[in-house]
Image: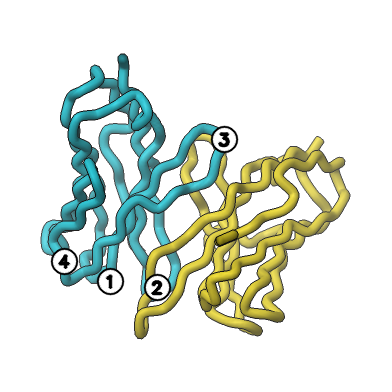
Chain colours: A yellow, B cyan
């Protein structure tokens, strides 16, 4: 019963490097999300997807890219890492009950530091 | 645009007390509301999901209520324990898909 799995758990990047944060869910959920959480700032939506092949921007998409080639996977790509991208990143998924999302489940997070 | 507010930002109570956490939202046209718990350095754990047609949802010592017309939800924790210490977040969908979160209430239960 894995739920939402994120890798890696921790990563240190140098300024200008790139990396991909992996996210996989095994609940056959249509909706998947990437959030970032900064201390005292709450969760901000980066990108989301309503199904394979469909993605859309959230509140803070600059500096990130996503793809959704399968229902299970929703990787987040950081290009040219900047110190402002130091944060904890959470992936989440939820199902659909008609036109609305059902209960959302979160991964354990990736703590990223850009130096 | 949906906005979610949680008050207070932090709360400290002695063990055994009953307590209420508050969540308010600006757009009452929501499909559901979800309460989460987050332990330090960990992910979010879903506690309760209340559909828009429901007024209450219970799980063990937790009871969540929803009043759509006033844009409010409360999370009631009975007989609090030190293990309940965590940050509690509420979230509502904006439109059909995107979850909007409050800033959370950091709860400390003192033995």
Label 4: element kind:
loop
Q: Is residue B23 visible?
A: yes
Front disc: 4 or 1: 4
Label 1: element kind:
loop
- Residue at the spot x=67%, y=60% of the render? A62
- Residue B107 numbered mark, or none: none
Front disc: 1 or 3: 3
The location of residue B77, given as percent across then percent down, is 22, 37
Q: Is residue B102 visible?
A: no
Q: How many marks?
A: 4
- Residue at the spot x=45%, y=74% of the render? A95
- Residue at the spot x=48%, y=59% of the render? A105
The residue to which callout 2 is attached is A101
The residue to which callout 4 is attached is B54
B106 and A85: which one is in front?
Answer: B106
User: Which mark sits nearer the N-terminus, 4 or 1?
Assistant: 1
| Residue B55 as seen in the image, left or right of residue A36 | left
Label 3: element kind:
loop
Asked if B83 appears above or below A28 in the picture, the reply is above
Q: CA distance from mark 3 to mark 4?
A: 32 Å
Are the residues under badges 3 and 2 in a single subunit?
Answer: no
The residue to which callout 3 is attached is B41
Residues under numbered marks 1 and 2 in contact, where contact means CB atoms less than 8 Å apart: yes
Mark 2 neighbour class, 10 Å CA radius: few under 14, some 14 to 19, many 20 or more: many
Asked if B109 appears above or below B94 in the picture, the reply is above
User: Which mark sits nearer the N-terminus, 1 or 3?
Assistant: 1
> Where's the N terminus of chain A, which quadrant?
bottom right
Q: CA distance from mark 3 to mark 2?
A: 26 Å
The location of residue B85, given as percent across then percent down, is 37, 29
Are the residues under badges 1 and 3 in a single subunit?
Answer: yes
């Amino acid at each position: 019963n894995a739920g939402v799995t994120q890798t890696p758990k921790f990563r240190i990047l140098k300024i200008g490097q790139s990396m991909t944060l992996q996210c996989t869910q095994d609940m056959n959920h249509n909706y998947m999300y990437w959030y970032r959480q900064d201390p005292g700032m709450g969760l901000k939506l980066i990108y989301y997807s309503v199904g394979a092949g469909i993605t859309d921007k959230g509140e803070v998409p600059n500096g990130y890219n996503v793809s959704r080639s399968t229902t299970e996977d929703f990787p987040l790509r950081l290009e040219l890492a900047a110190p402002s991208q130091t944060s904890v990143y959470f992936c989440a998924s939820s199902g659909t009950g008609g036109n609305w999302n059902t209960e959302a489940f979160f991964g354990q997070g990736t703590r990223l530091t850009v130096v | 645009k949906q906005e979610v507010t949680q008050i207070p930002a932090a709360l400290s109570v002695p063990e055994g007390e009953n307590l209420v956490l508050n969540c308010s939202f600006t757009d009452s046209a929501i499909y559901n509301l979800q309460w989460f718990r987050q332990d330090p350095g960990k992910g979010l754990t879903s506690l309760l999901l209340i559909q828009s047609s429901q007024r209450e949802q219970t799980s063990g010592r937790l009871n969540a209520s929803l009043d759509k017309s006033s844009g409010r939800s409360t999370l009631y924790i009975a007989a609090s324990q030190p293990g309940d210490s965590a940050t509690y977040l509420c979230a509502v969908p904006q439109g059909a898909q995107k979850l909007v979160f409050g800033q959370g209430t950091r709860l400390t239960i003192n033995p």
